[in-house]
């Protein structure tokens, strides 16, 4: 099996990419290299989560963001960050989950991706009992829906 096919299967199995994103990357070796690097950082972050090294998770997320994905793979970036952030939230690491989302918001341009990140951030605020911040963040997400 070719490396691209193995990587595509990896990305799909872990829910990190819709099929069209993997297909789009197939024609771009530079993006494939970034996806492969992101996959390693993602798995390292998973191990850090398991060992309770939560600050290291955010550091790995930043390494993923620093790869500078093109528009065709921005959705992969967003979904992977959201998945790791969800796990931080489940570990009661609210501040770190928000930190990861805030860093991601600086790295993505697509309104749909920004919307998903803002919706998650609002949920983190809500989970913390920070109703005013949650409402403000939901309203920011709501404004984006007019641009879809």
Image (cartoon, rainbow, N blue to C red):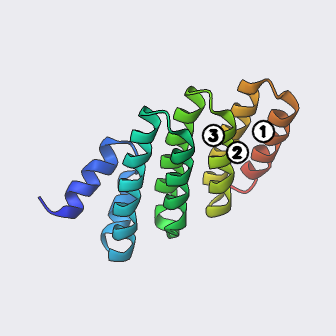
User: Mark 2 highlights which residue?
Assistant: 118
- Gap in Å between the C-alphas at discs 2 and 1? 7 Å
Q: Residue at x 54, y 61 (%)?
A: 65
Task: Evaluate if marks 2 and 1 touch, with contact meaning CB atoms under 8 Å apart.
Answer: yes
86 left or right of 147 in image: left
In the image, residue 8 above or below residue 26: above
Q: Earlier along the polypeptide chain: callout 2 or callout 1?
A: 2
Disc 1 is placed on an element classified as helix
Residue corresponding to mark 1: 138
Density class for disc 1 (Cα within 10 Å; few <14, some 14-19, many ≥20) is some
Q: Earlier in the sequence, mark 3 or mark 2?
A: 3
Mark 3 residue element: helix
Query: Can you identify the residue that label 3 sits on?
Result: 97
One can see residue 144 in this view? yes
Secondary structure state at the residue bearing disc 2 = helix
Residue 109 seen in the current view = no
Name the quarter where the N terminus is drawn: bottom left
Name the residue rendered at 48%, 48% in the picture. 80
In the rendering, at what x and y percent does residue 122 appear?
73, 36
If you read the primary sequence from the N terminus, does the residue marked by circle 1 or circle 3 appear first? 3
3 or 2: mark nearer the eye: 3
Query: What residue sits 75% from the left and 32% below the top?
Result: 125
At which x and y percent is residue 21? Answer: 40, 59
Tell me the crowding category of disc 2: few under 14, some 14 to 19, or many 20 or more residues within 10 angstroms, Cα based: many
Q: Quadrant of the C terminus?
A: bottom right
Q: Residue furthest right?
A: 132
45 or 137: nearer the eye?
45
For the residues labelled 1 and 3, the Cα–Cα distance comes to 16 Å
Q: Position of residue 88 (x, y in %)?
A: 56, 35
């Amino acid at each position: 099996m070719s490396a691209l096919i193995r990587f595509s299967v990896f990305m799909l199995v872990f829910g990190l990419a819709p099929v069209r994103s993997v297909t789009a990357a197939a024609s771009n070796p530079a993006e494939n290299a970034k996806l492969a690097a992101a996959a390693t950082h993602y798995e390292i972050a998973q191990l850090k989560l398991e060992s309770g090294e939560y600050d290291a998770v955010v550091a790995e997320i930043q390494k993923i963001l620093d790869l500078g994905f093109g528009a065709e793979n921005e959705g992969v970036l967003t979904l992977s960050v959201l998945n790791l952030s969800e796990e931080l939230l489940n570990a009661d690491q609210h501040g770190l989950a928000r930190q990861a989302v805030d860093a991601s918001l600086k790295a993505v341009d697509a309104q749909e991706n920004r919307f998903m990140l803002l919706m998650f951030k609002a949920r983190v605020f809500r989970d913390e009992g920070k109703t005013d911040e949650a409402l403000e963040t939901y309203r920011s997400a709501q404004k984006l829906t007019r641009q879809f």
